[in-house]
Image (cartoon, grey):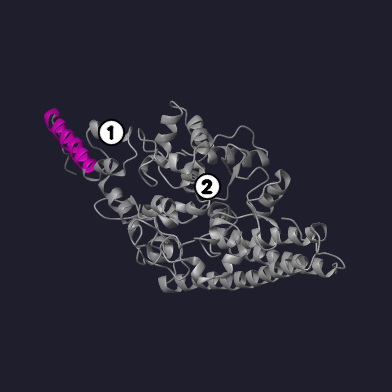
Amino acid sequence: MKTVSLTKSKTAKLLAVGFFASIALLAFSGDLLPRPVEAQTNETDDPAVWGKRFPMHYADYQKTVDQARTRYGGSEAVQVAPKESDPRSVVAQSRLDEDPRLKIMWDGYAFAVDFREERGHAFMLDDQTYTDRQKVAKQPGTCINCHASVYLAYKKLGDGDIFKGFDAINKMPYADARKEVSHPVSCIDCHDASTMKLRVSRPAFINGMKAYKASQGIADYDVNRDASRAEMRSYVCGQCHVEYYFKGESKTLTYPWSRGLKVDNMLAYYDEVGHKDWTHKQSGANVLKAQHPEFEMFSQGPHARAGVSCVDCHMPKKTGPAKITDHHVRSPLLMVEQSCNTCHKVDAAEMKDRAETIQTRTFNARNLAMDALLDLINQIKAAKDSGRSDAELAEARDFQRKAQFYLDFVEAENSMGFHAPQESARILGESMNFSRFGLMSLSGVKPVKPFAPVKK
């Protein structure tokens, strides 16, 4: 065997070549650029500045303006002409026109006036700023927490303390809070600018997760200290894709997780604190409006149990000049091969068909629950108009509150049942049963022996 002998000078030259080759490769992949750009990212919520250091990630982020609709919506919508009165106004199609029953379910609430199909992250701030809901309700600054890049606004208003800044924004009128932000969700909301590690920047999620962990017997939980990297790949999304309410006079954004993450737990919490979102205009029931609980529903599903994160499916790895996480955040059904086929070795068309089968079954059950709820609302209204007292209607109204929240929990969750198929089916079944109980209450009939479900 021939022995290769290297002199010290040759060894030094090879090491030098290897070192500079590594530097060039890192710079080319966007993972290393001069310090002035890195310093800039510490101080800005402008994704374009981050894009100087991470051009491929930024190019993907810019694609969230794309409009590509899946069968049951998702995070994209079909674009229609903007309102002539304001070219910046919401341009997605109306969900109220698609299903007028929603106007009855939400009668007396701002969502009955304007509710549009969801669009990509690039539109999240404009879609809230220019919705007609702003015209019929005095929305608080709390709304801005999940529709804008707010981390630097927190720091500014709280003199470096994001919790104090969070409190300040919650107390503002929406118009004032809107002046404090400039961009939709941005890089700094999910990444530590110094290390690029994922981190949670929303105090509401930090507080909510602490309350949830306490309900599981885990004291003093700090999500940024205690969460694993795999968990963080869902938690950064869960900062906003959650159920919430505005607590107290300060309108503090609060996630109702102190009893758990299931819809049953949250209803029990709301009942305990006596919260209502509004009084239904037709029935007089004190009702609740569920808000995009993707994180909670996903947590009950098979993918979460298997250790899959939100990022794995909605931001899968992609190859190119370098292998990166795709920041064109969108429905996995628009990229089945990248999102699903990395784990499921099944034809992409078959995978999409399986997903849409789950969604179609959920959609059909949702329609049955919606019809049952509207029957109950109509019957309560008729009973009220005929002179029945509030005391006589109290039980039926409480069943409406339950039926409506359970139905809306699935309606507002943007996967049409896919995140947790069995849980979604259970919730819709419970909703129909609550509507049935409400109708029985109006007629004076009591169940012989109400079914007591087995708890798991």
Picture disc at residue 40: 1
CA distance separating discs 1 and 2: 36 Å
Q: What residue type is labelled 2?
A: Lys
- Give the side of residue 348 with respect to residue 286, left or right: left
- Dot 2 falls on a residue whose secondary structure is loop
Q: Nearer the viewer, residue 405 or 178?
A: 178
Which residue is disc 2 drawn over?
Answer: 138
Point out residue 199 in the picture as x, y percentages from the top left corner: 45, 39
Label 1, secondary structure: give it.
helix
| Boundaries of the magenta span | 8-27
Give left or right: position of 48 versus 198: left
Q: Can you tell which quarter of the image residue 152 is in?
A: top left
Q: Which residue is drawn at 48% across and 68% down?
A: 72
Q: How crowded is mark 1: few (under 14 residues within 10 Å), some or many (20 or more)?
A: some
The reply to whether the C-beta atoms of the residues labelled 1 and 2 are less than 8 Å apart is: no
- In the image, 137 versus 438, the foreground residue is 137
Please name the amino acid that badge 1 sits on: Gln
**SS majority, magenta:** helix
Q: Earlier in the sequence, mark 1 or mark 2?
A: 1
Q: Assign the C terminus to one quadrant of the image.
A: bottom right
The residue sitting at 36% across, 67% down in the picture is 80
Q: Is residue 344 above or below residue 88?
A: below
Residue 258 as seen in the image, left or right of residue 453: left
Asked if residue 364 is positioned above or below residue 249 in the image, the reply reads: below
Residue 262 on image: x %, y %: 64, 53
Q: Name which residue lies at 54% across and 38% down.
A: 206
Q: For this rendering, which residue is in front, 299 or 66?
A: 66
